[in-house]
Amino acid sequence: MSEEMTRRRFLVLGGVAVGAMALGGAGYAATRAPEVGRSRTTMGAGMSKVLVVYGTGSGCTIGVARQIGKTLAERGATVEVVSATEAPAPAGYDAVVVGSGVRAGNWHGPVESWVSANAATLKEKPVAFFTACLTMASDPSKRDEVRAYTDQVIKKSGVEPVGIGLFAGWNQPKKFSFIERAILRMMKAPEGDFRDFAAIGAWAAETAPKLGLT
């Protein structure tokens, strides 16, 4: 192999490694930046008010957040599902659920910043966290790895959640950039929508009493 070919191979492999880290650290990204789908959704008409805040890029986590909101609304709450980019004020809610997809081994920036900015208020009420990540689809045994993304938020903010949900995300090629699609192919990431809405709903139902809902 010529020196030039060796150099090219090194650059390609290095680029793939850097790209893989950008997509999701040791795992895959469930969503990508910049943020999309900033619509606010209101569900239910109960006495308790619950805020569900999400961070996403491709839109994957919107569906997760709405399933959680739907389940909590069925448990007698009025639920607002809002993107972290809208900077919703948590003070007027009885409970809060916060979640994100993963990028570069972290939750999306807007939702991490939202948690940090509102940490004092969040510590005064029941809060649950969730993470959506494609790693859960490709290798369920890496649950601890995905949990670590949530643990980072807990450590940084000091907010102790009453429940933590870990869910598979998606790899919908049309939702990602050209470079991201190329990297995911090289990583042999499975294609498809791996969100298990039954499991998401079950987690929300299990978490509801911890949030003060009956």
Image: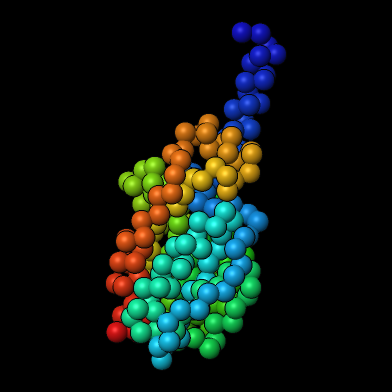
Q: Residue at x 59, y 34 (%)?
A: 182
Whole-percent x, y for residue 79 in the image: 46, 80
Note whether residue 66 is visible.
yes
> At 40% from the left edge and 50% from the top edge, which residue is drawn?
194
Outermost residue on the top side: it is 1
**Rendered view: 114 above or below 48:** above
Q: Position of residue 98 (x, y in %)?
A: 48, 70
Outermost residue, bottom direction?
47
Check the image and tell me how it is coloured.
rainbow
Q: Hey, which quadrant is residue 212 in on the image?
A: bottom left
Q: What residue is shown at x 54% (from left), y 42% (from top)? A: 173
| Image quadrant occupied by the N terminus | top right
Front-most of residues 28 and 73 = 73
**x, y percent for residue 34:** 65, 56
Residue 163, above or below 212: above
- Residue 25 or residue 155, whichever sits in front: 25
Please report the residue visible at 38 percent of the width from the left and 77 percent of the height from the top.
72
Looking at the rendered image, the quarter that the C terminus falls into is bottom left
Q: Is residue 120 visible?
A: no
Q: Which residue, as the protein is rendered here, is positioned at the far right?
A: 4
As drawn, 77 above or below 63: below
